[in-house]
Every structure is written in structure tokens, then in C-alpha cells.
Image (cartoon, rainbow, N blue to C red):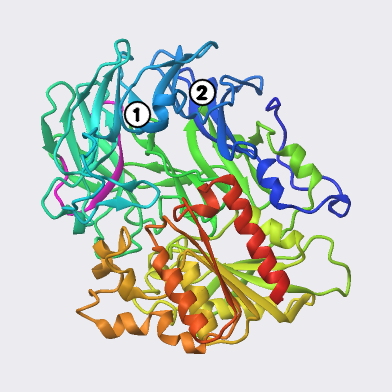
Amino acid sequence: MEGASSKNSHGLGDQMTRRPVTIDDLYALRSVGEPAVSPSGLLVAFTVTQLDRDEDVYRSQIWLLDVASGRSRALTSGKYRDAAPQWSPDGTQIAFLSKRGPEDDKAGAQIYVLPAAGGEARQVSAHGRSISSFEWAPDGNRMLFVANEVVEDPETDVRVITTPRFRFDGMGYFDASFRHVFVLDVVTGEARQLTDGPYDHQHATWAPNGSEIAAVSNRREGWEFSSVRDIYLIKSESGVVRQLTGGDGSWSLPAWSPDGSRIAAYGTRNLRSASARNELYLIDVASGATESATAELDVDLRDSSIADWNGYGLDRPRWLNANETLCVAGVRGTVRPIIVGVDSGAHEYIGEASGRYGHPHPLAAGKFVAARSDFQDPGELVVLDRAGGHETVTSFNREWREEVALAEAVPLEVQSDDGETIGGWIMQPPGLGAGEVAPLLLEIHGGPFGMYGDTFMHEFQLLASAGYGVVFANPRGSAGYGDRFAGLLLPEMGTNDLPDLMAIVDRAVEEPWVDSTRLGVLGGSYGGFMTNWIVAHTDRFRAAVTQRTICDWFSTWGTDDIFFADENITLGATPWEDPELYFRISPLTYVEQMTTPMLIIHSEEDYRCPVGQGEQLFNALKRLGRTTEFVRVPDESHGLSRTGKPAHRAERLRHILRWFETHL
């Protein structure tokens, strides 16, 4: 398939003649992302990922786009999962991460390099652990990479734990191995470890002169219970470390200014907030003086979108010149590229005021490239300019979009019981005839500081094609609506946001096609918590599906991978300091009031919301004689619906459809 240019289009023919979206469409869709621009600004390397049904794995190819002609061609075979392409400083080579040889099965992703003109890739790293990130040095002869240090295999399978940060969801157990910064010689493959100690390091990046590396860490005793993350400067030859920031904030993704005198980074000094807005800070390299460039801009500079298809993540701020950086901002359900004046604080959005943009990069001639998806588009690459130009330049999902009937997401806006404005959307099943009615499903997002919005959700389209209306909203606490709105949730989770969700349901059932007697509710993570809370406080819903759930805050504390470290931020107390609060906000407290048929789906290696939460809820409901089932998914983490094995993702959707078909 060739990624030929096409104009943006949602009206692709007659929706009535098309087939419904199915579970098997997981294998037909393509995820387009990770654009990387050549030094000339004329070529873009990017990745195209798909699910392999036969081998039950993900496969990714690196493609190359010629911006002038709009033509794309594949650079790698698609036999592996190739990711994170980066151009060499001279533009002749492209490095990327991949698992290819049998030794990589144990070690994980390593760095490969291929000629930009085409040819075979060669492996340049042979680290014993998976490499999480890397970057070319300005001289093109070296790279830095971040990976867990290699430690000797223990003589026993019994673990001796000495730090509370001993495992992390999706990563597993650390086994006394921490992430450190390494420097790699591209020619010889020799690597030197620059940092050491029982501390994690992330987001490493070269200074323009190649003599220093900036990285994020907390190298203080007790860092496991701290939200502080500082920027450290590391000499690339000696490994001497200097703390740059002052321990009063949490910084991420540093980016050196072109002259090396300043660093732009995302972060916050509001360490007592669990929903702190991501601001753009400027840090003076000589003095460490730190100032926010967006203190007056009540916008979160990150992508907090909840989606089951594209996961764009967040890039470093990109310096366009000495005075401007390119970022993304979450704005009321959209994610938009934004140019920020680092000294003036002025800002300018580019692209359309809709959709979800990711990985924006500057091109030549004042243009920009980004990945983009929306409610009805699984995602392509787009080229933008500051004058409002917007062109879709790949077409990997166009044929699929022309085959299927896609539901439209219609915006809703309601007033909660205290007058707070709540935004959401509703999808009507495609092909629903005049006078016909359909059951309605309320989808609740996780986080809780994420947001639903204008990005592609295969699950929503699948449920709509199966004949269900789908309503979803951003209750208080959601990202994208400013500091005040995000701060309205805690600590009374459930109590504070339940009226918001019920208000959106009340508005949805006013639609003439909604059967108000056949309502279902489902959600995952915090959405699973809220699903439990809702059915414990109303019998309005006839069926529920709770996923990667929390039912008891007491037993969550100390058994998950993050909550134990920030409970004083989220709830204001530990369980022993305020047991009444933990009791009051736990759905298990109200389990006797749960009569709605409940399906529980939980991954066995979920360290964010441990599987014991699902077990507790299931056994309590069984003890009470309620209608319930427990679907346990082995070898999966918290991200099952987004990053799980393809077969498990498909089976999860089959169970959801089965449950609602049975009980609605």
C-alpha cells in the first residue's frame, strides 16, 4: 500500500450501504505515527503499526514520506516491531528501536541503523536490557540511550525487596535494576554507563555542543515517596552529575535551546495537586533560574486523551527558533499543536480546532507535519502551516473507512446539579431507522485526570455498529478544561462526579431514538471505580461492565505501583490517618446495594489496579447472590484494551458484547 496524498474527508459516500464495524477490524486498521523530520525538512520517517492475527503480535514498519511529492514508501519489511525513528545529524541514516534477533527476545528492543536511501539495517547496540529511549549525538558518532542497568541473574527466584518502587505496570519487577543513561559509540558498539545509584533516570537529551546531557531524575533519599523530579546535567565524558533545578518542582522532557544557554521543559511547581497543569518552563543553564512561560495560560500542555487505538504520547518542546517552541495542548476534548513564545508567553494554535494531533514537527518552508486522528478517522499524517493550511498526506486507513458505517459523535453540553457545565458526546447506531429506538451505554473514562474527545475509539464504533447508542463525557476532574475544573473532584471521588455523569445520561435519554429503559454502563480504571459506584447508588442501569477496577481504597494502598506514593496528594491522608475517608469512598462499602448484573474484566498482571480488586468485588457479589462473572486475562497489564495481545483485546470485546446482549 502506498501512502498517497488525500484531502481530509469524513463524508466518504453513503453510510447506509456500508458494513458494520466488527471486532476483526482491529486487524484491518493501521496506526500511523511517530513522524521524524530529516535535517533538510523535506523528508519524514514515520511508523505504521498493525495487529498480526496469526502470530498474535504487533508489527510496525518504518515508512518515508517525500513532502514535496506526497509519495511514501516502506523502508523496513514489517516483519518486526520497528519504532521511534530518528535521523542522523547529516541526514544519511535513520536509527530506530526494534527486536529482531533471538538475543533480543530476552534483552528487549535494541538500536538499529539503516541508510536513509534504503538498504539493510544493522544493529548498533547490544545492551542486556530493553532500551526505552535514545538520541543521536550532535557529532553523529555517538548516541545516548536510557535503559535499565544489567544486573547479574540472582541465584534464587526469591526476591528480596528493599525499595517500594519494585515493580511498575507494563514493565514488571525491577529486580534491583534502575534506569540509567549510557553513551554508545555508533561504530564500535561500545557503551559506557554514565549514571549510577538506586535512582531512575529518564528523558535524556544532548546539549548542542555534545559535552553535556540533560536528564530527569530524583537522586535524593526517599525519592520513591516524592513527586519531585529534577533536571540534572551530566558530563558526557566524565559522567559528573550536576543538579540544575532546585527540588521545588516536577520537570519532564527537557529540550536545549539552539545556543545551549537555556532548557525548555514541561513541569509544575504545584506539587500538592494530583491534577497539576503541565506548563512550559524555561531554565537557565548557568544559574538554574526557572520561570514558567505559560503561567497565565490555563491550558494543559500534554495529550491526556483516552483512546484504544493511537497512543501519541508527548514529545519534548521543539524549539522553532530562539524565541518559540512547538508543543501540544489539551483543549476541551481536542489536542492541538500550539506555538509558545518562550519569553512573551504569547501562544498560537495551528491546525484545525478539532481532532487529536500528535508528534508535531517543523518542516521546511514554514510548514509542519503531525499525526492526527478524530472520531471517524483512525489516523494519518497531516501537513499544516501557520496560515491555516491543512492537508492529509497519507491514506493507510482510507479504504477501511470507505467500507464501514461509522457513527457520528454529536456534542452534548449539560448543567450538573451545582450548575457546573459538563461536556460530552453521543453516538447513534448507524442505520437506525425512523421511529426505531436503541439501548444506550454510558462509557466512563479512566485517569481520573484524562479526557474523552475527538479521537478514534474502535470500541465506541463497535458498540454503535452492534446497535447501541454510546454516550461519553468529561466529568469534573477531567483534563482539558482548566485548573479549577480539574480540582473539583478530590477527595470525594464518586460523590462529586456522579451528578455530572447522571446529568449527561438525563440529556441523552431525551433523544427520541434512545430507549431509556435499557441503559448500560461500563468503564475501566477510574471508569471501573465509577461503574461500581454508580450501580451502588442507583438501579437505573440494567447491566454493567467494570474493568481493571478499584472497589476498595484500603487494599489498593500499598499493592499498586503509584497510589502509595501520592495518597497525600490525591486523598490528603494515608489509610491509618483517615480510615473513615477510605471507607466512605470505597464502592465495596456499598456492595449490598449493587443489584445490577455485573461483568468484571481484569488483567492478572495489572499493577496499577491490582487483580485483587476484581477478586474482592466478584466474591462479594457472589456472596450476595448477585448476577456476576469474572473474566481474568493472563499475561496482561493495565493497558489491555490499548496494548494487550491482539487475541486478548478481541476476546475482551467479545465478552463486553455478550454481556450487554444478554442483559440489555
Q: Nearer the viewer, residue 101 or 199?
A: 101
Query: Residue 513: x percent and y percent?
Result: 79, 74
Q: Relative to 73, is 459 above or below?
A: below
Residue located beneath label 2 in the image = 364
Query: Residue 586: x percent and y percent?
Result: 39, 79
Label 1 neighbour load within 10 Å: few <14, some 14-19, many 20+: many
The region drawn magenta spans 244-261
Query: Residue 569: x percent and y percent?
Result: 27, 68
Q: What element carries label 1?
A: strand
Q: Is residue 252 magenta?
A: yes
Instruction: Label the magenta part by its dominant secondary structure.
Output: loop
Q: Can residue 519 be seen in this view?
A: yes
Locate residue 659: give its quadrant. Answer: bottom right
Give the residue at x 23% y 48%. 291
Quadrant location of the N terminus in the rendered image: top right
Query: Residue 397: x percent and y percent?
Result: 70, 38
Q: Nearer the viewer, residue 382 or 548?
A: 548
Q: Relative to 521, is 136 above or below?
A: above
Image marks 2 and 1: residues in contact by CB distance under 8 Å: no
Quadrant location of the C terminus in the rendered image: bottom right
At label 1, which amino acid type do we have? Phe
Q: Which of 245 and 390 is in front in this view?
A: 245
304 sits left or right of 342 in the view: right
Q: Nearer the viewer, residue 405 or 302?
A: 405
Q: What element carries label 2?
A: helix
Give the residue at x 57% y 19%. 75
Residue located beneath label 1 in the image = 134
At label 2, which amino acid type do we have? Ala
Q: Residue 534 carries which label?
A: none
